[in-house]
Amino acid sequence: MVFTRPKIEVRLWADRICYLSRQTRFSLVVFVTISSDKPITIVKLANGFDLGLLDLLVSEVIECFDTDSGERIPVLDSGLSLQLRSSNKGNVSLMSFYDQRSQYITFTTAESPRDYESLFDSSQLLPDRNYTLQSKPSALKWWSHGSEENILEHYASHGKPPLTETPALVCEPGNSVSFVARADVPQPPKIEVSLSVPPTLSLSNNPPFEFSVRFTSYAAKPITVLAERQYARASNSDIEIIDNNTRKRVAPDLIDDGNIDGSWQPEDFLRLAPEVCYVEQRTLNPIRRYSGLESLELDAEYSLCLPPSRWTWWSFDDLDEVMSYAGERGSGALGQVPSIDLVCRDEKVFRVVK
């Protein structure tokens, strides 16, 4: 079997917007994949030794520049590396890799990074400028086929990793990613929610119980919100029916289908123009199987309401722009903004009839 020298591939992922006020975290995630015939161990970070992958990423591999002017901006500079070393308390941090299995390193603007995160310095970025992060070719000086246990034992005895005759590990350039810097996180707009409900609900569904939900935005300009109204309409998961005597929730009694995966779809989003009421026509069908309305009693009086909820993401971008970057559910590609709180003060009374 012919031995092939291991090599590193670096791929980058970053949030789309970096808010310089640091009210929300901006993250750069560096995915590292190593091609190797056998498992290898590398140094992630070691005090006093320029041997680690983190040192390499900060000093040589990753660069940030102004997309328009080309000016290089030090967002992962040596000062940060020294700060990280000082928090490492004299220990060495190792990473083990298996063939084609990726690990990741995260840089963030968060004021209190998690234990496994490093710092991203946004202090020299300017608002309303576009920036590009890219990886460059380089080489990692130290790596070993030895186990983490043996390497740590040697480090504890000698204060440094063991000598190795392995050639430098080639670090191949990967992709580039872009982001825009903004001064402050936009404040969530006010959304007014109201209900319109018929006076009776027929257990025979004759006539159908048709009600409406209205949303009115008071944003300064049109917004796109992640509302997932198609799911809400199909499941009636956003409403509650209250027994007027006990004031307890009695319906709908729904089964949670679990998380939905896949890509975000255009129907998951709602485009709202300022002060233009968006009306959503809805139906409750008591004769439908698994309607969730089985506990409603004839001649009893109930109230239909929408409990407080929130839309977790919104943007001034139009729907086509949003779909160009939305990506997979759970990918984080949409980024973070303050949620829009939805409060419906309407509580509409109806009576159950045959």
Image (cartoon, rainbow, N blue to C red):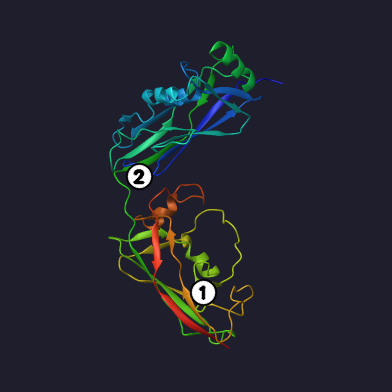
At 57% from the left and 19% from the top, the residue drawn is 143
First along the sequence among labels 1 and 2: 2
At 52% from the left and 76% from the top, the residue drawn is 246
352 vs 288, nearest the viewer: 352
Residue underneath mark 2: 23
Residue 299 x %, y % = 55, 87
Q: Quadrant of residue 259?
A: bottom right
Residue 31 x %, y % = 52, 34
Q: Amino acid at mark 2?
A: Gln
Secondary structure of the residue carrying tag 1 is: strand
Where residue 343 is drawn, which disc sits there? none
Q: Are marks 1 and 2 in contact (CB under 8 Å)?
A: no
How far apart are the two marked residues, 1 and 2, measured between alpha carbons? 38 Å
Q: Amino acid at mark 1?
A: Ile
Residue 245 x %, y % = 51, 79
131 vs 92, nearest the viewer: 92
At 60% from the left and 61% from the top, the residue drawn is 257
Q: Split into 4 quadrants, where in the image is the C terminus?
A: bottom right
> Where 270 falls versus 290 (above or below)?
above
Relative horizontal placement of residue 321, taking residue 240 as reference (left or right) = left
At 40% from the left and 41% from the top, the residue drawn is 26
Residue underneath mark 1: 241
